[in-house]
Image (cartoon, helix red, strand yellow):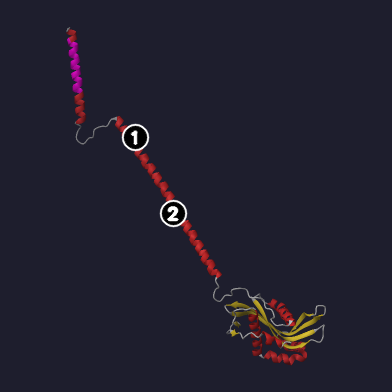
Amino acid sequence: MKKSMISRFLSVTVSAMLITATAAGCAAKTQAPAGTEPAQSIEAEEETEAAKEQTEEQSAASEDENAVAGDQSTASEDENTAAGADSQAESANEAETEVSGAEEPGASSASLPAYEYPGPEAFYYDMYKFIIDEFSGDYEKAEVCIPCVQIVAEEMEDPEDNRVYGIFSVFNYNLNGDILECVSGGVYPGVIHVKKDLENGGYVFTKAEIVEDGTNYTESAKKIFGDHYDDFEKLSADDKAGEETRAQIIANYVAANDLKISAYQDYGWDPVTLPEENIDSFYSILD
């Protein structure tokens, strides 16, 4: 019985000591020194750290989504910018096409038609063509070559060697606005040889003999023109008659092709207004 009482006493004493120790520990936790925070348990720290990591991961994911969205927005802006640039380029190209398609002041709107003798005589049609083919090759190509023919005399008695004596000129023009600007040309006084084409009933222009330049001019002119030399000299000295013939031939060319041309001009000179067309009576004197 004494053993049992001692045992109970010890049990009570130990229990009292455990209760006292536990109470003291709790009091120590609740009464921490000023300026210090209560220590968290390991589990609380782990939960806090996990929550922090989850928050950081969510924040990083949100930042990535925002970055992707920003990239997509930037790409969309770039596409819109590129589309706008393409649209502006197309508009500029269309405007440029419209401007280039418009007629510029002082520029010809289309190539001029080749010159063709507009009179009724086939003989002179072929002769004018022969003059262009024979002499225009001495110059750079222009928009149109228009001859100027001043006939001194004709000898048509010999079927094998008919002759046309005259001053044969070619003038090459480019169109500037409504003015034909002469860019080159030359005067070829002499005789053109022609023979009849008995088979076809027409004429064949075979060759041209031209007066020499320089010191041999007079001697070669007398030799070529022979009995017609005085008439040649008289016609050659009349510059006014030569320009009138030239202007009338141009005016008839303009009328025959329904062109909007009002004058011709030599370099360094004022434009010369064209006369009224006179195809019928002007060429009749050549019969």
Q: Please, is residue 76 above or below residue 190 in the view?
A: above
Q: Which residue is mark 1?
A: 50
Instruction: Please tell me which of labels 1 and 2 falls first in the chain.
Output: 1
Considering depth in this image, is 209 or 94 the residue closer to the camera? 94
Considering depth in this image, is 201 or 236 the residue closer to the camera? 201
Q: Please, is residue 50 above or below residue 279 in the view?
A: above
What number is the disc on residue 226?
A: none
Q: Which residue is mark 2?
A: 77
Dominant SS type (magenta): helix
Considering depth in this image, is 104 or 213 the residue closer to the camera? 104
Q: Quadrant of residue 248?
A: bottom right
In which quadrant of the rendered image does the N terminus lie? top left
Task: Check disc 2 and give the amino acid type.
Answer: Glu
Magenta-tinted stretch = 5-21
Q: Please, is residue 30 above or below residue 233 in the view?
A: above
Q: Is residue 17 magenta?
A: yes
Q: Quadrant of residue 38?
A: top left
- Image position, residue 100 (x, y; %): 55, 69
In which quadrant of the rendered image does the C terminus lie? bottom right
Question: Image point 74% across, 91% down: which residue?
Answer: 229
